[in-house]
Every structure is written in structure tokens, then in C-alpha cells.
Image (cartoon, rainbow, N blue to C red):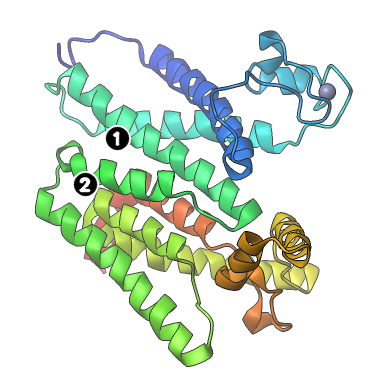
Amino acid sequence: MTLSQLELPVWLARVFAFVFGCLWASFVNVVVYRVPREMSVVRPASHCPACGAPVHPLDNLPVVSWIVLRGRARCCGARISPRYVVVELLGGALSLAIAEVVLRALPGDTTVLHAGSIFLADFGLAMSLVAAAFIDAEHMFLPDAITIGGTLFGLATPGLRGLGWSDVVVGAAVGFVGVWLPFIVGYKALRGRSGMGVGDAKLVMLAGAWYGWPGAAFALFAGAAQATVAAVVLLLVEGKIDEPEAVRADREALRRAAEEGDAEAKQALEEDPLGTAPAPGIMAARMPFGPFLCLAIVEWMIAGEWVRDWLGAI
Ligand SMILES: [Zn+2]
């Protein structure tokens, strides 16, 4: 069956795409909470982070439940972070955008199976990037399951994006080396610390594995431009850039463990670039870069065609 034979009303397809996105994004919330805490993402079923009571499925509906309960848990009244709703709405909006932009560009004789594969791959990547962005914003760490797993998936599926094997292999290599060499090896030689994390290099590698070297280049440059704007806004509004609270708390916990003679904690403190407090001053400020890379990759997924046309016209 092809897309033109599928007589699905456009409004119904849109509603379906939005609801589908919200539902999966509520799983993304579970990933964002549990993965940095080294918990399983499938077991146990949802429970209240404040008092541990199990959450009734009806109180666990994306967006709707948060509004009905006015942002509080039914069990103990604890405040539920608006992040949950933001992530769910983001999932709905991205699913809708991918369906509109990516699927509508396909010719009518595309099979439903092929179109569905393209949608699911793109949506899966978008949700993985949302999870990575929120985890990195809070903990300054990008899970390998997302960066390396996403890279492997991209390398295995170039046909879904009209690319060839050489495009994605070269893209991934250019993406990784293009960040690792100047910003990690070179920067460290010059300034004694790395300018980016290896996780950031893996994320740009993922961009290349999905979209070839132009995608990797866009991720790096648009990511850096947007991070710079965010840093300037933060400095203007707050006068300083603080490292994320959880990063400081983790370091304190490690230091206490090391002082009590835990050799593993001691080694982790020495090896982790986040193991020492940031030096004072704006130049040494510590800001997670992953969320901006993720944003740029999603921008390329949705508007890459348009960016290429625009760059070609100037
Ligand atoms: Zn509770």
C-alpha cells in the first residue's frame, strides 16, 4: 500500500501524531529520571519520587494528569516538576513536526511501510535527543546508550534518509575527530583542561552518522552559536553561570566517600574532569553543551532541507 492509497484524513493523522508523541515522551521522562540514577527504565512501574507510592495509570496520563492535579502528586501533595509536561508537549510537537515535514516531502507512491520506517526512525532519534539533552543539562553527562547506540543505528540506516554508506561513515568520522582533535586534545594542550567532553564528540559523531558531514558541521556550528546566545543571556540576567546543582552534589558525595577511604571514589574524582570545582571567572564557567548539540541535530532533521537551500542561495 502506498501513501496516496491510504485515505487517512489529514486532521486525524495530526491528532494521532501528537498523541503518539506525548505518550512516548512520558517514557522519556522515566529515562531522564532513572538512567542517571542507574535504575531500570522498565521496572518498577511509575512511583511517586517524593513518597514512593505507586502512581495510578489514570494519574499518569501525559499532560492531562498534570493539569488536572495542578502539578501536585495525588498521594502526598509533593510538587511535580513542570519538566514532565514540557517534555510531553515537546514529544507531541516533535512527532507532529516530523510527520508534517518529513512525510509530506515523500512522493505519493512511497509505501506506507517505508514512510512509517522513516517516521519511526526520526521520531526515535528525536526522543533520544530530548532525553540526552535533559540528562546532560542536569548531570553534565551523555549516556553512551544514546550517543553510541544512536550512531550505530544511523550507520545501519542511511537508505531511510536517501544517503549512501560512505556518506554516513565519513560523516561519523568527521564528526568525532572534528570535535575530539581541536576541542579535547588541542584545547587540553593549550589550556590544561578540555573545552568539551568526549560525550559531546560522540553526539556530533551521531549527527554525522545520520546526516553525513553537513549534518555534523551544522550540529557543531549551530550548537555553538545557540550555546553562546544562551550563555550571554544567562550572564545578562543572572550575572554568572553556575554549574548544575546535581553535578556539585555528586562531587560532594564522591569526595566524602573518598575521604572515608573508598578507592573507587578517589579514582573517579581524579579521572573525571568534573571532579574538581570550576575555577572562578567566566572563561572557566561550566555549562553543558549537549542540550545545544541535541537542539541543533533536531533542527537539521526538521529544517535541514531548507537550511541547505538557503546556504546554496547565498
Ligand atoms: Zn507521593
Image quadrant where residue 278 sits: bottom right
Nearest the eye: 99 or 313: 99
Residue 188 vertical placement versus 297 (above, below): below
Residue 273 vertical placement versus 129 (above, below): below
* Residue 287 visible in the current orientation: no
Question: Decide: marks 2, 1 in contact (CB < 8 A)?
Answer: no
Total tally of numbered discs in the picture? 2
Q: Is residue 140 left or right of residue 246?
A: left
Q: Is mark 1 within 8 Å of ligand 1?
A: no
For the C terminus, which image quadrant? Answer: bottom left
Q: Secondary structure at mark 2?
A: helix
Q: Is residue 45 left or right of residue 218?
A: right
| Amino acid residing under circle 2 | Leu
Q: Which residue is mark 2?
A: 155
Q: Quadrant of ligand 1?
A: top right
x%, y% of residue 270? 60, 73
At x 75%, y 36%, the residue is: 81
Image quadrant where residue 312 sits: bottom left
Image quadrant where residue 261 sits: bottom right
Circle on res. 102: 1
Closer to the eye: label 2 or 1: 2
Circle on res. 136: none
Nearest the eye: 7 or 124: 124
At x 61%, y 36%, the residue is: 34
Q: CA distance from mark 2 to mark 1?
A: 19 Å
Residue lying at the far bottom of the rendered structure: 190
Residue 121 vertical placement versus 290 (above, below): above
At x 43%, y 65%, the residue is: 198
